[in-house]
Amino acid sequence: MKNYFIICFVLMIATACDSMAQQKKVGGPCEGCEAIYESPVPFEQIKSFTALPDVSWDGKKPMGINGTVYKADGKTPAPDVVLYLYHTDATGHYPKKGNETGWAKRHGYLRGWVRTDANGFYKFGCLRPAPYPGGTEPAHIHVTVKEPGINEYYIDEFLFSDDPLLTEAKKKKLENRGGSGIVKIVDVGNMYKGERNIYLGRNIPDYPAAK
């Protein structure tokens, strides 16, 4: 009987430690990352492709960005990873319609969600954002990641290699969270295309070591 209680005690300690490990936050402070949970549909219903609001071929030429999300080993595709994206409009502002709730009050309505497929693939379409008014920061697309079993965290923004505001000095300051976020945009005629692969955990503080 004594051995039974010892075993139970050890199991309780192990369970508690495992629970604490699972609750440990990775990625450091992340203001607004909880916006990823404002998806209008459950995560399991999010598709691997989304067209962010205002995208069409009737006005400005749209931009499509795709890529593969890899696990921490850098080579295994990661399925069921949700990406939350938002960006400015052609004036450099986060536009609002006036009925926003939650984080949309700050992020605006030019936002969307994608979830990687079985091959880790994702794709989204949008209009190319403009830099903030004043033109001191490069144009960018914010991105938050939520992978199974890990809390949400931010990675480097999508940036554009042809942006004159993306100077060498600014490149050196990039953290490369999730890998490089600099995208080469190519004009393919009816739209622009770019590609970015994402590596889970890369340069992310407190990320669990790959097993």
Image (cartoon, rainbow, N blue to C red):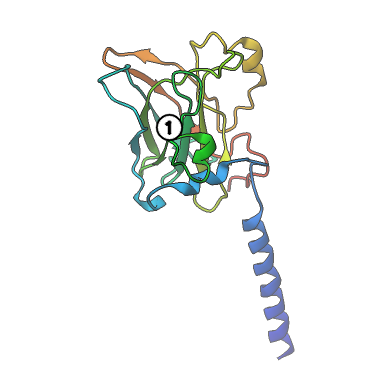
Residue 121 in percent (x, y) is at 37, 36
Residue 12 in percent (x, y) is at 68, 74
Residue 73 in percent (x, y) is at 53, 39
Indicate whether 13 appears above or below 181: below
Indicate whether 143 appears above or below 210: above
Between residues 47 and 85, which one lies in front from this camera angle?
85
Q: Residue at x 52, y 31 (%)?
A: 142
Residue 74 in percent (x, y) is at 51, 35
Label 1: which residue? 110
Answer few, some or many: residues within 10 Å of disc 1's Cα (few below 14, many 20 plus, some between 14 and 19).
Answer: many
Q: Residue furthest bottom?
A: 1
Q: Residue at x 55, y 19 (%)?
A: 132
- Residue 116 visible in the displayed image: yes
Q: Residue furthest top?
A: 164
Direction from residue 114 to residue 176 in the image, left or right: right
Q: Quadrant of residue 18?
A: bottom right
Q: Quadrant of residue 188?
A: top left
Q: Quadrant of residue 177?
A: top right
- Residue 199 visible in the displayed image: no
Quarter containing the N terminus = bottom right
Q: Amino acid at mark 1?
A: Leu
Q: Secondary structure at mark 1?
A: loop
Indicate whether 20 appears above or below 188: below
Between residues 139 and 21, which one lies in front from this camera angle?
139
Q: Residue furthest front?
A: 98
How many marks are shown on the rendered structure?
1
Q: Residue at x 48, y 25 (%)?
A: 88
Q: Residue at x 52, y 25 (%)?
A: 181
